[in-house]
Amino acid sequence: MKDDINPQGANASENAHDENASPQAMGKFLLDDQGDWIQDPEAAPGSRSDMAGMHQQPFKDDRSLRSESVQQRVLRVKAARNPLLEAAQPLLRALSDMPEQISDISQVELLKNMLKSQINLFSIVCDEVNIPWKKMAIVRYCLCTALDEAAHATPWGLEAGWSQSNLLNYFEGDNDGGNKFFLLIGRLSMNPNEFADVLEVLLRILGLGFEGRYSIIEDGDRQLTKIRQRLLTLIQSTRNTTQSILSPHGLQPPGPVLREKNIIPVRLTALCAGVLIASTFIWFKYSLLKRLDGITSEIYAMHNIKVTTPQLKIRLRLAVLLRNEIKKQLLSVDENQKQSKVVLNGDSLFLSGSTSVQPEMAKIIKRVAHEVRRVNGEVLIVGHTDATPIHRPGLPNNIVLSQKRAAEVARYFIAAGLPEDKVKVEGAGSSQPLASNNTAQGRAKNRRVEFFVTY
């Protein structure tokens, strides 16, 4: 059949993937098996020498290194209190100034190439000022992760498919930066004195809005605040705030220090102090009583002020609402501050060649539709198929099949009370595959319905 799935084949594929997983995918990125940092970058895969050959070709000639702008940047980095932070400043500014809108989607590739060039230049500047390779690699990994998240959170990032050719995969061959960013923080925090400069850069990245895996975790904002506070405490603890003595080379006078004799009796001093305190109290008391009437009138006037309590913006929490279905692998959810993306497995949603939603999945769609109506969101529903041709009455091709399946899902949103002008339907057919259509597992993954909720 068109929509069958072979469980045994899927297990074999997963086992093969585990056997061929890279060291970074197994959690061994930037570290050896004993938990020590790699000391020999030339002997390690993905080291500076390897990466320079792969991604630093635009900057490898001596003329670019001798250029005025690069040399000025090297001098600034050398003079900075934290050279690593100064070297990362252009990329941090790019992260903070990530555009919300790009009118021409073709300019996204220009932006990506510029960021790649800046990351290459960051690596070379670190090398010029003798910053340890391991520190540079950690910061580069985290900057790529943060820049990818910021771009993916924008409408143009989704439209251009930024996540399919992101910076982290280009430089590090990895796609799990949202989790490993915080694993790095945990390991670096065990030795804050050595990695204080790296932790300071990571704190700046968190301060610019990076959320990683905590963007879809309930109460993630509070946990991120705790992490930032912990990082700030660690960084401050590594700085020597003890002031030096006033005169380190001062000469002590010879002989014992003589104490001066008290000329004024202690009782007279106490009496004068008491009189001064009493006089000061009486004066301030008089001044306060003099202004009491005016202050009282102002307090009574404040009772008539109407205070409007700002309403908190309601956010979708589809990852929490559909956590049971996610565990059953019936669907997947990807959420950020402005958009929620839900991918429904086509095999669990429709029968082979059918455009009618199965009853158990209809309940899930209704729950999502009511949640979207609660936040007054807009929905774009996109149907996808595999590349297997179909010839049935009323279904001449996969484009028509995907359009009708998307329209069937849209009917549930409209029935839930969402206005028709806020529900859009598209049929992509087999034009946007997630996996190869040469295997049953790949075709099953390509058969899906996605909807994007914007609010």
Image (spheres, helix red, strand yellow):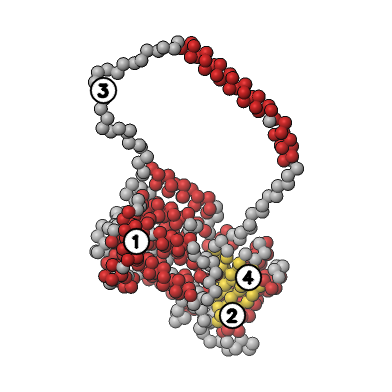
Which of pointers 4 and 1 lies earlier in the amino acid sequence? 1
Q: Quadrant of the C terminus?
A: bottom right
Between circles 2 and 1, the one closer to the viewer is 1
Which of pointers 4 and 3 lies earlier in the amino acid sequence? 3
Circle 3 SS class: loop
Which of pointers 4 and 2 lies earlier in the amino acid sequence? 4
Q: Residues within 10 Å of mark 3 (few under 14, many from 20)?
A: few
Residue at image point 24% right, 20% down: 254
Quickly name the residue at label 4.
Answer: 379
Circle 2 SS class: strand
The amino acid marked with disc number 1 is Arg
The circle drawn on residue 73 is: 1
Decide if residue 43 is on the left or right side of residue 6: left
Decide if residue 413 is on the left or right side of residue 332: right
Quickly name the residue at label 3.
Answer: 253
The amino acid marked with disc number 3 is Pro
The amino acid marked with disc number 4 is Val
Q: Residues within 10 Å of mark 1 (few under 14, many from 20)?
A: some
Between circles 3 and 1, the one closer to the viewer is 3
Alpha carbon distance from label 4 to label 1: 47 Å
Q: How many marks?
A: 4
Q: Is residue 197 visible?
A: yes
Which of pointers 2 and 3 lies earlier in the amino acid sequence? 3
Quickly name the residue at label 2.
Answer: 427
Q: Position of residue 446 (x, y in %)?
A: 51, 77
Q: Quadrant of residue 175?
A: bottom left
